[in-house]
Image (cartoon, grey):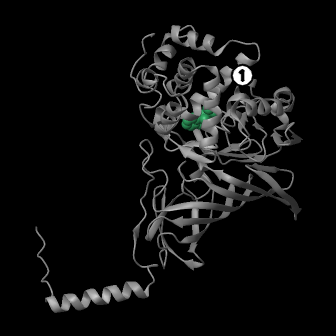
Amino acid sequence: MPRSAPALPSPAVRLALAALLVLGLAACGGAGRGGRPGADGAGDPYFPRMGNGGYDVTHYGLTLSYDPESRHLSGTAEITARATQDLSAFRLDLKGLGVRSVTVDGAAARTHRDGQELTVRPHDGPAEGDTFRTTVRYAGTPQTITDPDGSKEGWLRTEDGALALGEPNGSMAWFPGNHHPSDKAAYDVTITVPKGLRAVSNGELRSETTRKGRTTFRWHTAPPMASYVAVLAIGRFDISRSTTSGGLPVYSAVDPAQAGASRAVADRVPEIVEWEERVFGPYPFLSTGVIVDRDGDAGYALETQNRPVFPGAPGLDTVVHELAHQWYGDSVTPETWRDMWLNEGFATYAEWMWEEDHGGDSAQDVFDALYSGEYYDSPSDDEALWAFPPAKPSGAAHISDSPVYERGAMVLHKIRETVGDDTFRGILRGWAEEHRHGNADTHDFTAYVERRAPGKDLGPVWKDWLYGEGKPARP
Ligand code: TRP
Ligand code: ZN
């Protein structure tokens, strides 16, 4: 049934109402009351609900306490953000856990939860450009999240504690935030655990204090970090500290059960970082290291910022890969999950270059083996390599498939072949420099390469290797 139209007020009354409205807005100084709710997603083509619109986080202050015995996490998240529109309400991503209270700039805010969206309706909504601080008190048993591809992330229980991992959407299991890679921020993570356990996170350890049977670790990350590379590892760890020849602090945490098997490769972290600095340019963060948990604590290694995580003693190639992500992924972060090959193609190519530089197979050898199909034992793996083009994964469940990794690396090899070794090395370094601590997408990359290699015909590389369906023909 159509609703009946309301009767319009007379022109004189309308004029008076309009004048009142203008006066009212002026009296508010543009702040508060007005505005509209921020979007419930960041516009990602693969994960539409991930992240939120209307604000940019500049800093997360997380104060957490965890007890492995009861599996209880309690915490306060202080989120400092800048409004990018007038906001009547905004959303944070949080999965599970109970929200005890939310304030915005100290004033209680109304909240509503619906799936992973925590909607916050401040008493006075921030105006565009305002910096505002949201404080969320929360507690509960954090959940493990299953990815679209079936792998486990979020909060993973381990024998002696827990491991929190975020790629692509696990970080909402342990703190509320704008969980999309396009919104990077600084972090302070303060975490209290029972004495005897340690808590390892990103950035640098500021302090460690034990009182009344509990130890508090304060971790600080100043350079911007995407939430999917935030990490928290709680358990028993052997700690080792050193420095690279360039003076970069190395802080590594290894589960005692993995210490023997990890020692040789963990000791090579400085050498690997020094080689990567020669090839990729200055290390983008203020410290490095590794976190080695036990086999099965996670189903994969992950390039968590500053210190990647490995489930069990890693191979050298995996350490080279995860540390290469510090430049490609953690410092230069994809704009959306469609740009994932900018992470994985680069980190995979880093492994090929390491081998080539250390007397192993050349990148050309690996490329040829992949192209001919000899690289894989099974025909179905070979077929999977050509299932979709690197720049257009066939869905959220496929962002970590071989077309993103190996075929992504093949794109880089084709660029190298087209522009020559010297220009190629300049492109690798320049790309890391150009978008250091930022975000970039595939188009930014192709445009950058074109600029660095004027007169080279890169069209076929983009058309056939980067965007083309199926296996490209040999030129
Ligand atoms: N990024 C990890 C690596 O290659 C692998 C990985 C872990 C991953 N979890 C993921 C990739 C989720 C895509 C989605 O080092
Ligand atoms: Zn990777």
Residue 137 image point, x, y percent: 62, 68
Ligand 2 within 8 angstroms of badge 1 C-beta: no
Q: Which residue is mark 1?
A: 354
Label 1 sits on what residue type?
A: Trp
Q: Going 50% across and 28% down the picture, which residue do you hit?
A: 454
Residue 94 image point, x, y percent: 54, 57
Residue 262 image point, x, y percent: 82, 29
Mark 1: give few (<14), some (14-19) or many (20+) Cα within 10 Å. many
Q: Going 46% across and 24% down the picture, which residue do you hit?
A: 458
The answer to whether residue 101 of the structure is visible from this angle is no
Q: In the rendered image, which quarter contains the N terminus?
A: bottom left
Q: Is residue 469 above or below residue 270?
A: above
Q: Is residue 76 above or below residue 375?
A: below
Q: Is residue 376 above or below residue 56?
A: above
Q: Is residue 226 left or right of residue 54?
A: right
Q: Quadrant of residue 70?
A: bottom right
Q: Going 60% across and 42% down the picture, which residue do you hit?
A: 434
Residue 227 image point, x, y percent: 60, 50
Q: Is residue 116 left or right of residue 259?
A: left
Q: Going 53% across and 19% down the picture, which residue do you hit?
A: 418
Q: Is residue 265 above or below residue 364?
A: below
